[in-house]
């Protein structure tokens, strides 16, 4: 190996070793703490169906919340003709977190799903939202991802599909205010609620923010659930005080 080429290699190694810790330690914007729920189904030939299904967020280093209609029992069932279905929580700045059925607790009557990770797979504290209290007519915000938008880069490894990288996600940030609070009974195509405490908020029901956090001053009080069937321009979020 020539001296010049050797120097280039050593420089590249130094750059990688010096920069990786800085990237790992980089802070996360308060608008970019949520994770995308990525669900795919595929066959042995590598045909893949699925994509970004919604949003999830962490309330502790090992517990994430999302909407039941985003992540449910059927999420782990392959499509007809496929042999495998897999689910991950993905973020641009950390390794993909694969979710197994044993990690999940479902609450379909309140449109909520909780993900409990094993301690070795805990996320960094910078991704965790504190819980807050609700104040009528408070200014609120949310964050999430566009459904079926650009997501992870996939690679075929034998008969399996793996996530190669997560270079870019189509993020959404919305602001508004709490319009009212109510207990909601609802039976729709993908959402069922039974006397569930909810907040009606003024931001629009963009497809993909389902499962995302309803935030007051950066603290989470609810989970985005469904678009108001009357106004078509407002969102309902499920309260999470007791979940």
Image (tube, rainbow, N blue to C red):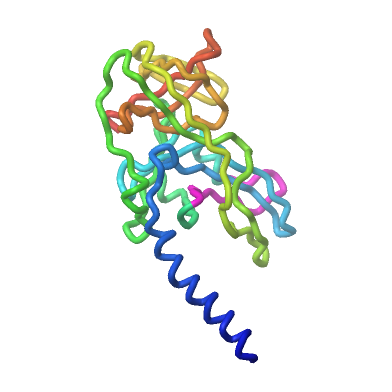
Task: Please give the name of the residue rendered at 74% of the width and 58% of the height, measured from the top-left corner.
Answer: 45
Q: Is residue 202 above or below residue 97?
A: above
Q: Is residue 22 above or below residue 229?
A: below
Horizontal and vertical percent position of residue 24? 41, 59
Given residues 139 and 196, the one toward you in this image is 139
Res. 215 image quadrant: top left
Quadrant in which the N terminus appears: bottom right
Image side of residue 150 versus residue 186, left or right? right
The reply, left or right, for residue 192 in relation to residue 75 is left
Quarter of image, res 176: top left
Could you tell me residue 167's position as x and y percent? 58, 52
Pick the residue in front: 21 or 113.
21
Residue at 34 percent of width and 48 percent of height: 126
| In the displayed structure image, the side of residue 51 where residue 96 appears, left or right | left
Q: Which residues are magenta?
A: 77-92
Q: Is residue 114 magenta?
A: no
Q: Is residue 78 magenta?
A: yes
Nearer to me, 33 or 103: 33
State which quadrant residue 31 falls in: top left
Residue 32, given in percent of the width and then of the height, sits at 44, 41
Q: Residue at x 35, y 55 (%)?
A: 122
Identify the image quadrant of the C terminus.
top left
Give percent across and percent down for residue 29.
41, 42
Labels in figure, total: 0
11 over 85 or under it: above or below: below
């Amino acid at each position: 190996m020539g001296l010049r080429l050797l120097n280039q290699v050593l420089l590249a190694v130094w750059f990688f070793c010096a920069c990786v810790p800085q990237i790992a330690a980089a802070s996360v914007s308060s608008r970019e703490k949520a994770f995308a729920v990525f669900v795919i189904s595929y066959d042995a030939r590598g045909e893949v169906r699925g994509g970004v299904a919604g949003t999830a967020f962490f309330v502790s280093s090992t517990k994430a919340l999302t909407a039941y209609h985003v992540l449910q029992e059927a999420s782990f069932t392959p499509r007809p003709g496929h042999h495998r279905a897999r689910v991950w929580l993905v973020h641009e700045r950390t390794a993909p977190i694969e979710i197994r059925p044993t990690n999940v607790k479902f609450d379909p009557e309140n449109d909520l799903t909780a993900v409990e990770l094993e301690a070795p797979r805990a996320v960094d504290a910078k991704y965790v939202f504190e819980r807050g209290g609700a104040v009528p007519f408070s200014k609120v915000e949310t964050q999430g991802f566009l459904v079926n938008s650009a997501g992870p880069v996939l690679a075929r490894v034998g008969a399996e599909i793996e996530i190669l990288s997560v270079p870019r996600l189509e993020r959404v940030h919305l602001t508004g205010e709490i319009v009212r609070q109510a207990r909601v009974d609802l039976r729709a195509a993908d959402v069922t609620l039974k006397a569930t405490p909810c907040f009606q908020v003024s931001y629009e029901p963009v497809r993909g923010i389902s499962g995302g956090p309803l935030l007051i001053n950066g603290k989470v009080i609810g989970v985005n659930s469904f678009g108001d069937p009357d106004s078509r321009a407002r969102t309902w979020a499920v309260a999470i005080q007791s979940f």
